[in-house]
């Protein structure tokens, strides 16, 4: 598949999830719905930011290299977008739980880096 066909699907689903996230923000009352609305908010927030980070990382890869190289590295880009979204969602969750301090953010960032380095190590040893 070409990069433009991937980008069309990513743009479409990112727009869909961002719209769903905005709908959750404006239509649901977390005090009235309880944990269901909060869980739905964080889940859709995570998926929306995966799409946003995918679009940002793909555009960055396209500026640095060719489209063929970008398609070859697409699994790594997806992994990095998921990890960045996990970090952002974790930070928001820490803030929601009133436990966000600088050392929690640093530990979460270190965990994300360790996961990325582990995935890179495993992908290079399997080749």
Image: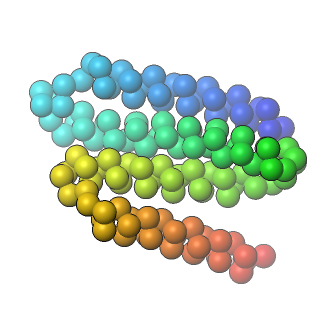
| Residue 33: quarter of image | top left
x and y percentages locating residue 11 in the rendered image: 63, 29
Q: Quadrant of the N terminus?
A: top right
Vertical order, 3 against 86 (above or below): above
Vertical order, 78 against 9 (above or below): below
Vertical order, 69 against 11 (above or below): below
Count of numbered circles in the view: 0
Of all residues, the one furthest to the front in this rendering is 102
Of all residues, the one furthest to the bottom in this rendering is 125
How does the figure colour the protein chain or chains?
A: rainbow
42 left or right of 3 in image: left
x and y percentages locating residue 24 in the rendered image: 32, 25
x and y percentages locating residue 92 in the rendered image: 32, 47
Residue nearer the viewer, 63 or 6: 63
Q: Residue at x 38, y 67 (%)?
A: 106
97 left or right of 52 in image: left
Q: Residue at x 84, y 38 (%)?
A: 2
Q: Residue at x 71, y 28 (%)?
A: 8
x and y percentages locating residue 80 in the rendered image: 59, 56
| Residue 21: quarter of image | top left
Q: Residue at x 26, y 60 (%)?
A: 101
107 left or right of 83 in image: left
Q: Quadrant of the C terminus?
A: bottom right
């Amino acid at each position: 598949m070409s990069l433009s066909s991937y980008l069309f699907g990513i743009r479409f689903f990112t727009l869909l999830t961002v719209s769903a996230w905005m709908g959750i923000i404006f239509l649901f009352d977390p005090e009235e719905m309880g944990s269901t609305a909060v869980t739905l908010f964080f889940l859709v927030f995570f998926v929306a930011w995966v799409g946003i980070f995918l679009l940002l990382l793909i555009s960055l890869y396209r500026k640095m290299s060719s489209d063929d190289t970008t398609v070859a590295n697409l699994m790594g880009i997806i992994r990095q977008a998921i990890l960045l979204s996990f970090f952002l969602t974790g930070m928001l969750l820490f803030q929601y739980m009133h436990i966000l301090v600088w050392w929690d953010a640093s530990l979460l960032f270190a965990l994300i880096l360790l996961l990325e380095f582990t995935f890179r190590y495993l992908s290079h040893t399997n080749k």
